[in-house]
Image (tube, grey):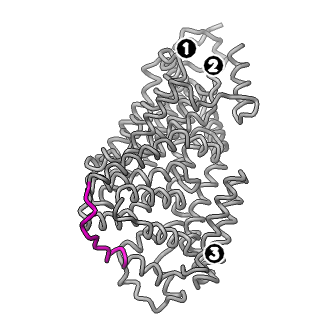
Amino acid sequence: MRKQINSSGDAGPVGETKARIPNLALAMSPIVVMLVVIIGGVTVLDIRVEILLMIAAAYAALLSIWLGHSWKEIEDALVTQFSKAFPAILIVLCVGVVIGSWVASGTIPLLVYFGVEAISPKFIIVTAFLVTLILSVATGTSWGSVGTVGAAFIGVATAMGAPLPAVAGALVSGAYFGDKISPLSDSTNLSAVAAGVNLYKHIQHLLWTTGPGAIVCVIVYTIAGFWYSDSAPAEVHTMDKFLHQLQELFHMAMPFGLLLLIPVVIIVVGSLMRMPTVPVMLTSAASASLLAVFGQGFSLKDTALSMMSGFTMDMFSTSQNSNLDVSSLSEAIPTLLERGGMESMTTIFLVVVCAFAFVAALTVSGSLDVVMSALMKVVHSNGQLIAVTVVGGVLLIAATGTSTVSFLILGGMLRHEYIRRGLEARNLGRTMEDAVTVVEPILPWTLAGVFMASALGVPTLEYAPWAVLCYSGVFFALLWGFTGFAVSKITKKSDDYEEYQEVKKCISK
């Protein structure tokens, strides 16, 4: 009987469907193609990343078929990947619903109002950090926090003569604290998806690196504040105008203003009680919708549209504030309000599907196993594994410029190795956030770097040294990795326990 020889030298009958195993160079080729296509397509041709990911996925699929795998295997792998991630994708869609309803209800405007009111001219740098931290945790958006309150802080800092790079760095650090640990953050949800972990357990584990980083930020920014004089009077007319316009647009006066915090309380209580995420979010959105209709005077139709398509300034034309001249408002007002809605999350959904197509084809081809086997030959400790995750995360975000792709590829490559070593997958999720999420805004060529520099009017390389949280995550990830502190092991109570047992059985065979 004739034998089919695979690339590893094994032989098998021609009638069998045993596919060939790629060598290391061939196994690396899909990853190289992906990096080249995305870097060239995004930076040179300005092509959307979804199309570029599909090109990379097509190459990986053709390689799999050439190695002897069937298209059905690739389809099954994609379905498996997507089915595991669907609950988290559902959460991402709910985030859009929550944000849209929170804007219409006046909840987000109230949080912004409180945040701006908390500004202390004496400690402008540390206050900038703390206010954007609170705001980003509550809203789940680093871009929204920086684009609204952040821009207002820069105006005050300019009038005070405060160092703009320091203030901008503090704003970015505070905004990305929330981008890491808020259950409303798309990056937090996506990193949990990529690592295959529960959202709230993921957030709890993130506090081991993000918490100490925040403490370091407070110390650094407080000390830095003493180096600058607070004797110059602050021209806060722009800030006062911003706050006054928010009060004109929404009913926020006490005691009614306390009711606007109900949607936030529902999210916080649900998180602490570890209740199912989707019902909690939908309950919060429902309460916000009632406040929007009966408290702010928006129509039921506009409230529903804000949850589906996002809030728009046109909705004020049919509300109780229909006589307000919207065109005279500060530019920061539309930036703050016009967002949210389920449709705003569809881009993320498409990127997830395209990235999973690439990861599925890469897995079926056996390339992932070959690359990981070669990589793990030089990884002998848990600390080294976490270091590899950090390096891989930084390289991917630097190459692709998007955290979504970085999370999904890195998670697909490394999750099995974490489980095999008896480490909970949330260690992977945390390290990916430490190496990807907060590193993105200090790289001038990424979307986050470009946005932050544009919104704040401070070049990325000028505020980057002051964005302390963007470095502390990497530092604490490596510190805990090599010391073993705060690195959770798989136990019988772990979500990964059954998978770990299956892996052990496979290894023993």
Q: Residues within 10 Å of mark 2 (few under 14, many from 20)?
A: some
- Magenta range is 228-240
Using the numbered discs, state the Cα–Cα distance from disc 1 to disc 3 in whole angstroms: 67 Å
Using the numbered discs, state the Cα–Cα distance from disc 2 to disc 3 in whole angstroms: 64 Å
Q: Residues within 10 Å of mark 3 (few under 14, many from 20)?
A: some
Quadrant, the N terminus: top right
Foreground residue among 240 and 388: 240
**Disc sitting over residue 35 in the figure:** none
- Helix, strand or loop at mark 3: helix
- Helix, strand or loop at mark 1: loop
**Disc sitting over residue 259 in the figure:** 3
1 or 2: tag closer to the N-terminus:
1
Query: What's the residue at 58%, 32% (across, down)?
Result: 486
Image location of residue 38, percent across then percent down? 38, 42
Main SS, magenta residues: loop
What amino acid is labelled 2 in the image?
Lys
Report which residue position mark 1 lands on: 6
Q: Residues within 10 Å of mark 1 (few under 14, many from 20)?
A: some
**Disc sitting over residue 18 in the figure:** 2
What amino acid is labelled 3 in the image?
Leu
Query: What's the residue at 57%, 36% (across, down)?
Result: 360
Question: Measured along the vertical axis of the image, is residue 208 above or below residue 159?
Answer: above
Using the numbered discs, state the Cα–Cα distance from disc 1 to disc 2 in whole angstroms: 8 Å
Tell me whether circle 1 and circle 2 mark residues in contact (CB < 8 Å): yes
For residue 501, side relative to residue 293 (left or right): right
What amino acid is labelled 1 in the image?
Asn
For residue 497, side relative to residue 438 (left or right): right
